[in-house]
Image (tube, rainbow, N blue to C red):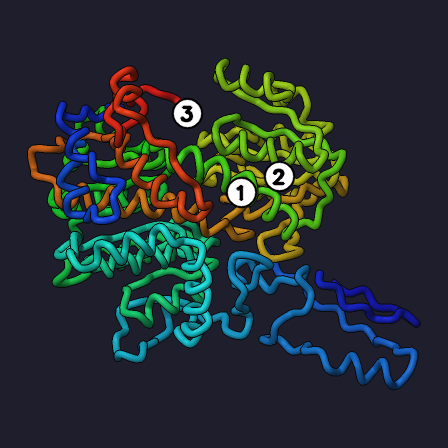
Amino acid sequence: MTDCGGDLKLEVKQASKEFKESENVAEKYSAMTGTNMNVGELSAAFTAVPTHKSMKKQIQFANQEEKQEFSKFPTKTGRRSLSRSISQSSTDSYSSAASYTDSSDDETSPREKSQVNSKGSSDFCIKNIKQAEFGRREIEIAEQDMSALISLRKRAQGEKPLAGAKVVGCTHITAQTAVLIETLVALGAQCRWTACNIYSTQNEVAAALAESGVSVFAWKGESEDDFWWCIDRCVNMEGWQANMILDDGGDLTHWVYKKYPSVFKKVRGIVEESVTGVHRLYQLSKAGKLCVPAMNVNDSVTKQKFDNLYCCRESILDGLKRTTDVMFGGKQVVVCGYGEVGKGCCSALKALGAIVCVTEIDPICALQACMDGFRVVKLNEVVRQMDMVITCTGNKNVVTREHLDRMKNGCIVCNMGHSNTEIDVASLRTPELTWERVRSQVDHVIWPDGKRVILLAEGRLLNLSCSTVPSFVLSITATTQALALIELYNAPESRYKQDVYLLPKKMDEYVASLHLPNFDAHLTELSDEQAKYMGLNKNGPFKPNYYRY
């Protein structure tokens, strides 16, 4: 925001059931590391708030030259704001991060628009199809750092292992996810897609996908009603019935299970990549209500150890910097949860000089935190002193209204878990508290005594709502998802029962091997004598399923 007064000079600020492999699986995979291994063979081998009123003030300039300089800048509504601290509304598409386009020029809901792509299709609902060219450039940039996924696409597109697959997906719609979606299309799948988070969609990327023929129903800043409407539009299409589900969080799976049980029963498989979604699948399985096989991608090594750890280690800092411009050195931070996401967050914050403590329920994770040099505390013991509170547990009501009431002025509160249940945001929507939107995805919640708590993304996932994430690490997860879809779609009916399965170790190793050339890494090969001594096949798998990396 800009303050103006008498002779002020204006400044412009930029501002589980582990799957058992058959005895001969090692031989089936013996040639996997060779360049001639095709995906068909690979798959066959698997057995496994109110807006502020503007205040008009007379701006006085020191001289005519300064006035002319100021007049160059856009000031009318609908043109891009030069200050990152100005946001039109909670649904403004312009963010300093996840989407680089401004939607303030058009507040019409996409549901009320009629849009057509260059091919004449209108089977999509996005913010603005005219942003497609910009979105295409974003996707091309992401592809440059997702070479392993592109390599898989090139190897398998001749075989079309997903020919006949009708995939309905609910993930974050970003440039990186677009590379995955277009890979699935290249492998023969028909795709209909929606967003798993109301703030993480890059509108220009959604436009590029819609222009290419993918039916996309998503835009940044959806309401809760929009969110479920988009999911329903994806599933409920006359003459088209999904036979595969790719989910992130379990909302799509839940919707199909509840609203379209006949469709759910005919699905060949579900691939789920989040803690929340996997938890929901295990609940269905335990209750005997899961009538299709499902792949737990979240607990695969290539997802948990890379996406959860390394991605969050970088993106936590990106999200906090872009939204608050905070300096980390000397700040008191509490991270709730010391799983892989928590470990990544703590590591990054500590490296920049923050004083970090951890809350945990698990004694093993708590001991790990202690050995890594972090004090393990209860939140109510330290909340008064904290400058930042970060949740990453996958649970609910980790930060309650009682905690929020006790926080000091200026405390930053955010969530790095998938779901928006960790911070009790609903308890803050009461008459005595005032909400002030200061930037896109940044709210000041003001108490009667003037205390402000800075809430980011309304308690939703910080990194994908407020920043971007590294393309390379998402390539690892996306490649795993693609292979899981191929496996479930092509597997004989007898291979997988109506249950939740972990990925075979060999698939994890294959995904990792595809990414090693990016680092010019050269694996050491076992000799026959060494392999015999260790009881291993020379081509893997190299670790038992119970091994913890």
- Examine the rendered structure and indicate whether residue 452 appears above or below residue 136: above
Q: Which mark is residue 285?
A: none
| Residue underneath mark 3 | 549
Position of residue 282 measured from the top left corner of the image (x, y, whole percent): 27, 28
Kindly state the secondary structure of the residue where label 3 is placed.
loop
Determine the secondary structure under disc 1: helix
Q: x%, y% of residue 415?
A: 54, 39
Q: Label 2 sits on what residue type? A: Val
In the image, 277: left or right of 53?
Answer: left
User: For the image shown, how many numbered marks are present on the structure?
Assistant: 3
Q: Image quarter for residue 334?
A: top right
Residue displayed at 67% across by 48% down: 444
In contact (CB < 8 Å): disc 2 and disc 1: yes
Q: Which residue is mark 1?
A: 459
Q: Which quarter of the figure has residue 139?
A: bottom left
- Residue type of the residue flagged with mark 3: Tyr
At 65% from the left edge and 49% from the top edge, which residue is drawn? Answer: 321
Q: If the image is split into quadrants, where does the C terminus sit?
A: top left
Horizontal and vertical percent position of residue 42: 19, 42
Crowding at dot 2, Cα within 10 Å, few <14 / some 14-19 / many 20+, comes out as many
Which label belongs to residue 413?
2
Residue type pointed to by label 1: Gly
